[in-house]
C-alpha cells in the first residue's frame, strides 16, 4: 500500500489540528531552535567586534610606525648587519668541498695546539631547513684531555672569524682523561 505525499500532508494537517501536545511540542522545538540561532548570532557578532577592535588597534600602531622617519636609517643598519653576518659564513662551491674544508681546518687546529692522537669525524654537509644555499657541517673530535691545550683550542674556535659553534663538550676521567667535542660550522654556497 503506497501513500502519496498529498495523503501524508492531509494526515499531518489532521494531526496538527486534533493533537494539542503535538502543536505545543513543535512550537517548543521551534522556540528552542530560534533561541539557539539567536545565541549563535550573538557570539558571531561578539567575535566580529573583537576582531574589528584588534584590526583597528593594529592599524593605529602601524600608522604611528609609518610616521616615524628613522626607518631609512634602520634599513641601512639592517643591511650592513646582514652583510656583516653573511661574511661570517664559511664559503664552499659544493657540499663535498665544505666537508673537506672543515676537515682541513680542524686538522690544522689540532696540529697547531699539539693535540695528538685525536680522532675527528666530519659529517657530510646538510641543508638547513628554511634557508636555501646554507649548509651545516658537524664535526666530532675525540682525544686525550689536557686542560691547557683544550682551553686554547676552545679559544681559537670561539674567536675564529667564521661561524663555528661548540654544541657539546664531554670530559671523562676514567683511567686516561678524555674529551669529546661536537661542533658545527655554517657554510654558504658560493656561486
Image (cartoon, helix red, strand yellow):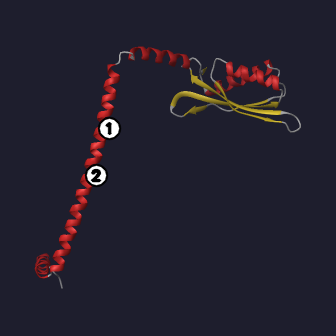
Nearest the viewer among 171 and 84 is 171
In which quarter of the view is residue 183 placed? top right
Above or below 26: residue 84: above
Task: Say which of 117 and 21 sits in front.
Answer: 21
> 76 left or right of 154?
left
Residue depicted at x 80% and y 20%? 113
Residue 10 shown left or right of residue 91 in the figure: left
Is residue 170 or residue 183 the one in the foreground? 170
Name the outermost residue toward the right. Answer: 175
Place of residue 174 in the rendered image (x, y in percent of width and height, measured from the top left): 86, 39
Can you see residue 110? yes
Q: Judge the density around disc 2: few (<14), some (14-19), many (≥20) Cα neighbours within 10 Å.
A: few
Give the labeled residue for mark 2.
43
Q: Position of 36 compared to 139: left or right?
A: left
Q: Which quadrant of the structure image shows residue 14? A: bottom left
Please tell me the numbered disc located at residue 54. Answer: 1
Could one spot residue 104 in this view of the protein?
A: no
The relative height of residue 79 versus residue 5 in the rendered view (above or below) is above
Assess disc 1: are there few (<14), some (14-19) or many (≥20) residues with their C-alpha within 10 Å of its C-alpha: few
Q: Can you give x and y, in whole percent of width and height, for residue 92 in the image?
A: 61, 21
* Discs 2, 1 touching: Cβ within 8 Å: no
Looking at the rendered image, the quarter that the N terminus falls into is bottom left
Q: Could you tell me residue 105's position as x and y percent?
A: 71, 21
Residue 81's disc is none
Q: Tell me: residue 104, above or below residue 176.
A: above
Sequence-wise, which precedes: disc 2 or disc 1?
A: 2
- Residue at position x 33%, y 22% from top? 66
Does dot 1 land on a helix, a strand or a loop? Answer: helix
Instruction: Please tell me in which quadrant of the rendered image residue 170 appears.
Output: top right
In what quadrant of the picture does the C terminus appear? top right
CA–CA distance between discs 2 and 1? 17 Å
Q: Residue at x 59, y 19 (%)?
A: 88
Amino acid at each position: 500500500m503506497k501513500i502519496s505525499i498529498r495523503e501524508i500532508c492531509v494526515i499531518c494537517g489532521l494531526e496538527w489540528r486534533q493533537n494539542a501536545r503535538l502543536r505545543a511540542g513543535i512550537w517548543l522545538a521551534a522556540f528552542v531552535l530560534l533561541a539557539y540561532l539567536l545565541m549563535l548570532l550573538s557570539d558571531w557578532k561578539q567575535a566580529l567586534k573583537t576582531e574589528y577592535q584588534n584590526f583597528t588597534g593594529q592599524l593605529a600602531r602601524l600608522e604611528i610606525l609609518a610616521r616615524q622617519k628613522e626607518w631609512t636609517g634602520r634599513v641601512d643598519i639592517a643591511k650592513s648587519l646582514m652583510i656583516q653576518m653573511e661574511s661570517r659564513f664559511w664559503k664552499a662551491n659544493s657540499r663535498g668541498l665544505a666537508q673537506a674544508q672543515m676537515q682541513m681546518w680542524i686538522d690544522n687546529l689540532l696540529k697547531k695546539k699539539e693535540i695528538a692522537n685525536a680522532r675527528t669525524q666530519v659529517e657530510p654537509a646538510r641543508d638547513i631547513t628554511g634557508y636555501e644555499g646554507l649548509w651545516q657541517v658537524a664535526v666530532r673530535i675525540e682525544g686525550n684531555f689536557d686542560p691547557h691545550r683544550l682551553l686554547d683550542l676552545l679559544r681559537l674556535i670561539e674567536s675564529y672569524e667564521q661561524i663555528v659553534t661548540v654544541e657539546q663538550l664531554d670530559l671523562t676521567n676514567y683511567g686516561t682523561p678524555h674529551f669529546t667535542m661536537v661542533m658545527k660550522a655554517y657554510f654558504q654556497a658560493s656561486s
